[in-house]
Image: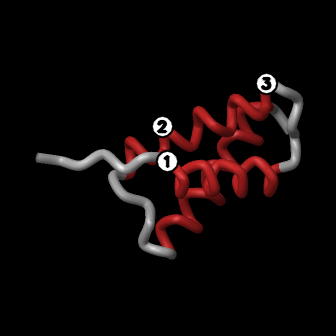
Amino acid sequence: MTDYELCEQSLGIACSVLARSGELGEPNDARRFLVDRITDMMRSGERRRLLLSNCAIDAYRRRPVRLVQ
């Protein structure tokens, strides 16, 4: 599996979980955030798809929420 495929699959899992739970928010911003987390972990050597997606989900849930005025 290529890095691109691994990232795509991990992102798909994370987006699906967050969408089903109603936590996804704005899709483009959410995807950008999740891809950044997944690629950071991949750069440090992680290759387990579910660990990548679960850690990205946890980071997304812990991120500071921006208020719109």
Where is residue 16? Give x, y as percent.
56, 65
Between disc 3 and disc 1, the foreground one is: 1
- Which residue is painted at 71% across and 51% down in the image? 55
Left or right: where 56 falls relative to 5: left
Q: Alpha-carbon distance for marks 3 and 1?
A: 21 Å
- Name which quarter of the figure residue 38 lies in: top right
* Residue at the extreme left of the image, as rendered: 69
Q: Are marks 3 and 1 in contact (CB under 8 Å)?
A: no
Residue 45 in the image, given as x and y percentages of width and height:
88, 29
Of labels 2 and 1, earlier in sequence is 2
Q: Residue at x 86, y 37 (%)?
A: 46
Callout 1: 10 Å neighbours few (<14), some, many (20+)?
Answer: few
**Looking at the image, which residue is at 83% across and 26% down?**
44
10 Å crowding of disc 3: few (<14), some (14-19), many (20+):
few
Q: Amino acid at mark 3?
A: Arg
Q: Amino acid at mark 1?
A: Arg
Q: Earlier in the sequence, mark 2 or mark 3?
A: 2
Which residue has dot 2 on it?
A: 32
- Tell me the number on the disc at residue 8: none
* Image position of 6 (left or right of 34): right
Assess whether mark 3 and mark 2 are in contact (beta carbons under 8 angstroms).
no
Q: Amino acid at mark 2?
A: Arg
Is 1 drawn above or below residue 14 in the view shown? Answer: above
Residues under numbered marks 2 and 1 in contact, where contact means CB atoms less than 8 Å apart: no
Q: Is residue 49 above or below residue 1?
A: below
Task: Identify the residue shown where x is 43% and y is 60%.
Answer: 24
| Residue 21 image position (x, y, % from top left) | 50, 75
Which residue was labeled with disc 3? Answer: 43
* Residue position marked by numbered label 1 in the rendering: 63
- Name which of mark 3 and mark 1 comes first in the sequence: 3
